[in-house]
Amino acid sequence: MAINFNQVPKYIRREIDPPEQAIEQGKRGNHVKQIQEWLNFHRCRTGVDADFGPATRDCVKDFQNKSNLPSTGKVDITTWLALVKPMTDALLEPVNISTMNAAEAVLAVANQHVNQNPFEIGGANCGPWVRLYCEGYDGAQWAWCAGFVTFIMHQAYFYRDQKAPIKGSVSCDTLAAQAIAAGLFVNESDITTERVKWDSLGECGLFLRRRTTTDWTHTGFFHGGTGSVRELVFSTIEGNTNDEGSREGFEACRRKRSVNKGDYDFIKFE
């Protein structure tokens, strides 16, 4: 079942709703910028300057040819919907979500998003995916790892017709504070000393990369877990990262992380 677009915030609709008229060469403005962003996402590379010139036209034709659409060089409703399909697919309601517990539902939605390979377009912390995860904002200051987990958490709970256990934030420190207040925060030492059993955290939750006892710099979803408690390796789905696990990367991806690094805390959903 598709997401109920009548209930999503306006900033999401701005990303996925098609323009009223076809966009073609000679046009300028935000819709042209969005088209250029999505062309780049689909590996039809062109500048992101909000100016629909001949290069953009030819990239539109390339995309239309790849998508088995009429090669007009104009972006009508059909071409627009094909361009933004990765985002609308990420927003779908997971099959059988009503049979899942909260953690399973969050993991299902997180997988939907990472399967679309969200990444930055047009500069650091820029592009449609960043705006989706940061309430319509993008730009260098909008590090989006916390926004990524917040959005997905709320999407999962929306489809469960439930309120999320914490409000969420674009700040890792705020996520930690909310979890502590809600009794959902688990310190890494509780795991390594087995005061809290790893399995009790559930199918999925949030990890927080800790710099100090009051400062966390990166977050994502954890799931799974193999090895002894002191050498525990967990799987992740995280945004604003890369193959090296940077907290200022460029994409959402899957990774492995190890508890024995001594700098992770966790947030459970139930």
Image (cartoon, rainbow, N blue to C red):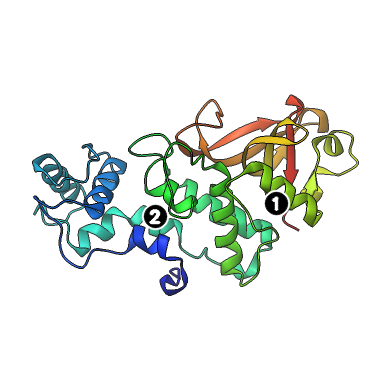
The disc at residue 127 is none
**Which amino acid type corresponds to the residue marked 1 in the rendered image?**
Glu
SS under mark 1: loop
The disc at residue 87 is 2
Q: Is residue 199 visible?
A: yes
Which numbered disc, 2 or 1, marks the residue closer to the eye? 2
Which residue bears the numbered disc 1?
Answer: 203
State the image coordinates of residue 56 (x, y, percent, origin top left): 15, 43
Q: Residue at x 21, y 46 (%)?
A: 50
Label 1 environment density (alpha carbons within 10 Å; few <14, some 14–19, many ≥20):
some
Q: Is residue 245 left or right of residue 186?
A: left
Examine the image and state in which quarter residue 41 appears: top left
Q: Is residue 105 left or right of residue 139?
A: right
Residue 98 drawn above or below residue 120: below
Q: Residue at x 24, y 50 (%)?
A: 35
State the image coordinates of residue 141 (x, y, percent, origin top left): 48, 38
Residue 169 drawn above or below residue 172: below
Q: Is residue 267 left or right of residue 18?
A: right
Q: Is residue 202 visible?
A: no
Q: Is residue 48 left or right of residue 70?
A: right
**Which amino acid type corresponds to the residue marked 2 in the rendered image?**
Met
Q: Gap between marks 2 and 1, in whole Å?
A: 25 Å
Q: Check the image and name the residue furthest to the front.
A: 141
Residue 46 drawn above or below residue 154: above
Q: Residue at x 58, y 60 (%)?
A: 154
Pointers 2 and 1 in contact (C-beta within 8 Å) = no
Label 2 environment density (alpha carbons within 10 Å; few <14, some 14–19, many ≥20):
many
Q: Earlier in the sequence, mark 2 or mark 1?
A: 2
Q: Residue at x 35, y 57 (%)?
A: 15
In this view, the residue in front, 90 or 203, is: 90
State the image coordinates of residue 121 (x, y, percent, origin top left): 35, 39
